[in-house]
Amino acid sequence: MISNSLTYQAGGRVFAGDFVCPGAPGPHPGVLVLHGGAGLADHEHERCAWLAEAGFAAFAPDLFGEPFQSREHAMALIGALASDADLLRGRLVAALCALKDDPRVDPARTAAVGFCFGGMAALELARSGADVAAVVSLHGGLATTRPAEAGKVRAKVLVCTGADDPFVIRDQRSALEDELAAAGADWRMLLFGGVRHGFTHRDAAPSPGMAYDADADAQSWRATLETLEAAFKNG
């Protein structure tokens, strides 16, 4: 594998992220790996490596652009992006353009995979009508201030969520189903019974609403790879 830093610009600011691709000659299908609320960390680095081993080029962009100074600072940064679809989508599209512009990436075959906050961001990328073959949201937020418009979602959408996730309640799942159906999107949802939030994070400290689940992690990752392979094959 080959790894290096990759930068992109959005809103007059420069952001950076980690790029990993197979050592074999490209161009390779490209995948954005979108981080959770804790920011870019080992979890995303690991998933980038897994994707590279599977033959994809992976770019994990830092969507926050600055380290957290405190919990309050972190919540302010997350809240600003979660409540402003234009701001978040602008950063996502800029990161996607950086991925597509890399000569090791096939710009006609790109996708996004996100976790927690990044799962919500992946869905926002799909809602924006971005030219991606697929988006995958793993234990991500489902609500939005800008629902998808009819005919605008170009990506295959996979949502993997836990039935016992207190941050993604049944009403939100139903609302997303209605939204994607009305938009005419190609979508599916995997719902894991008894599974809580953050089920792909092995090192996360268990809490009343969060816990790692090995089966849900393995099944959702297998479904992620199947979704990517099918989307790129048909793209």
Image (cartoon, rainbow, N blue to C red):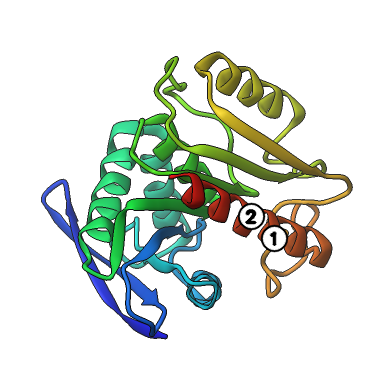
Q: Left or right: where does residue 79 sit relative to residue 143? A: left
- Asked if one can make out residue 68 in the rendered structure from this viewpoint, the answer is no
Residue at image point 30% right, 52% down: 96
Q: Which mark is residue 226?
A: 2
Lateral position of residue 117 relative to residue 104, left or right? right
- Depth check: 168 or 119 in front? 119
Q: Position of residue 26 (x, y in %)?
A: 32, 73
Secondary structure beneath dot 2 equals: helix
In the displayed structure, would residue 30 be above or below residue 205?
above
Residue in the picture at 45% in, 22% down:
148
The numbered mark at residue 172 is: none
Residue at 51% x, 54% y is: 113
Query: In the image, what residue type sits under mark 1?
Result: Arg
Residue 161 quadrant:
top right
**How many numbered marks appear?**
2
Taking depth in this image into account, of 45 and 167 the one nearest to the observer is 45
* Percent position of residue 48, x then y: 48, 72
Task: Give how far across and how far down residue 232 sits, in percent.
Answer: 47, 51
Tag 1: Cα neighbours inside 10 Å, few (<14), some, or many (≥20)?
few
Discs 1/2, front: 2
10 relative position to 24: left or right: left
Residues under numbered marks 1 and 2 in contact, where contact means CB atoms less than 8 Å apart: yes
Q: Is residue 171 above or below residue 226?
A: above
Question: Badge 1 is on which residue?
Answer: 222
Q: Is residue 128 left or right of residue 121?
A: left
Q: Is residue 77 visible?
A: yes
Frontmost residue, 187 versus 23: 23
